[in-house]
């Protein structure tokens, strides 16, 4: 893809006074190609350079569902040639329902890059730019990161609503670049196929690890967030729902129920009256199978991505598939909101609070 005159001009300006650069634009406008050109220009100019890949749906650095940071120390042909220096787990391939994770994760990876002493930090972002959701995500992510440059790549001024609010800030230079004519829209099937391949590559040589729930913290799930319910009350729940119960926890003012199979909630009223709460969450044990999880160390720094294979509720063990050679450093398991097989087939999204 050729580099236009306005791209050359913006890249020259940035490499003359490097800093944090955030790239925004709709899908298939050439954002990733611009990031590649800017990173290579930075390296060729002798500038210490890093890239933050915050496009969780089409990750170039790290597994899908993560935000990756990599150091660029030589010219590259593809961002996927880079190995991540740090990762942040979002747990989904769509920013919807994950605005906080996307904003915080991007900020953390930018800070990690700056902590490495890099002078040029290039931030690639998702193509979610339309509607209130897109505007909210990009506006608050920009406000949180406060880049030195905000570069909008657009075809027909379609992201002006993201650029105009920051045009008057003294600390930020807003620049506009035309999307190349060669940047054609890719069909959704292409994106799905690409994610599938990335998942497959990631888990191709994965190992199965057994983790004791008592040795780790569980994030983004009700599991392990409360106290196990006494067996007498579990029996009451089992009788009320007319199905076998695997696990029950009291979580604050709510109840989290894991059943062997889908239960009829016709007697939900009896549960609400018995336990004096309307906050009752019910899932099947099967729902945990193939959930994408993030594995982190004692400082909650991400080590790798895994797939939850099984939960032994009685003996309190998790079985997780991951490329990690050993799970001994793992102290945090972060639950994602997408289920996927090790072959890369996406089984569907979980709603917030499902697990």
Image (spheres, rainbow, N blue to C red):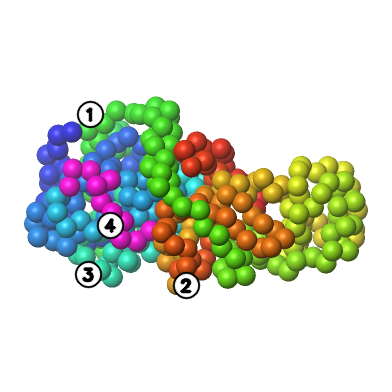
Q: Is residue 221 visible?
A: yes
Q: Earlier in the sequence, mark 1 or mark 4?
A: 4
Q: Position of residue 249 (x, y in %)?
A: 74, 63
Mark pair 1, 3: CA separation? 35 Å
Q: Earlier in the sequence, mark 3 or mark 4?
A: 4
Looking at the rendered structure, the secondary structure element under dot 3 is: loop
Q: Position of residue 110 (x, y in %)?
A: 32, 62
Mark pair 3, 2: CA separation? 24 Å
| Magenta region includes residue 84 | yes
Q: Which residue is mark 2?
A: 298
Mark pair 4, 2: CA separation? 22 Å
Q: Position of residue 242 (x, y in %)?
A: 87, 46
Q: Which residue is mark 3?
A: 117
Classify 65 as above or below 110. above
Looking at the image, which residue is at 42% across and 66% down?
Answer: 301
Image: magenta residue range: 76-87
Mark pair 1, 2: CA separation? 46 Å
Q: Which residue is mark 4?
A: 70
Residue 209 tag number:
none
Residue 182 tag number:
1
């Amino acid at each position: 893809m050729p580099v236009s005159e306005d791209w050359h001009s913006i890249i020259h300006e940035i490499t003359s006074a490097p800093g944090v650069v955030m790239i925004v634009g709709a899908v298939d406008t050439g954002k990733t190609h611009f990031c590649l050109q800017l990173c290579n220009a930075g390296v060729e100019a002798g500038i210490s350079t890093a890239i933050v890949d915050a496009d969780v749906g089409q990750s170039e650095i790290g597994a899908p569902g993560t935000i990756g940071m990599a150091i660029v120390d030589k010219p590259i042909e593809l961002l996927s040639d880079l190995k991540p220096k740090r990762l942040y787990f979002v747990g989904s391939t769509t920013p919807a329902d994950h605005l906080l994770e996307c904003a915080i994760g991007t900020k953390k990876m930018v800070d990690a890059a700056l902590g490495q002493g890099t002078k040029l930090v290039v931030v690639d972002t998702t193509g979610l730019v339309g509607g209130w959701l897109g505007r909210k995500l990009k506006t608050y992510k920009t406000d949180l990161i406060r880049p030195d440059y905000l570069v909008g790549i657009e075809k027909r001024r379609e992201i002006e609503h993201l650029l105009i609010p920051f045009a008057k800030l003294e600390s930020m230079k807003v620049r506009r670049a035309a999307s190349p004519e060669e940047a054609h829209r890719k069909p959704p099937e292409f994106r799905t196929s690409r994610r599938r391949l990335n998942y497959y590559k990631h888990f191709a040589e994965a190992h199965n690890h057994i983790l004791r729930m008592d040795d780790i913290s569980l994030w983004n799930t009700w599991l392990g967030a409360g106290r196990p319910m006494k067996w007498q009350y579990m029996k009451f729940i089992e009788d009320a729902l007319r199905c076998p119960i695997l696990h029950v926890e009291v979580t604050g003012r709510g109840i989290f129920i894991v059943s062997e199979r889908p239960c009829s909630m016709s007697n939900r009223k009896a549960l609400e009256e018995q336990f004096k709460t309307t906050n009752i969450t019910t899932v099947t044990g099967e729902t945990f199978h193939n959930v994408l999880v993030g594995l982190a160390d004692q400082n909650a720094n991400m080590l790798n991505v895994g797939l939850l294979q099984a939960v032994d509720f009685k003996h309190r063990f998790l079985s997780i598939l991951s490329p990690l050679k050993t799970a001994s450093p793992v102290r945090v398991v972060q639950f994602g909101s997408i289920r996927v097989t090790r072959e890369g087939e996406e089984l569907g999204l979980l709603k917030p609070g499902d697990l």
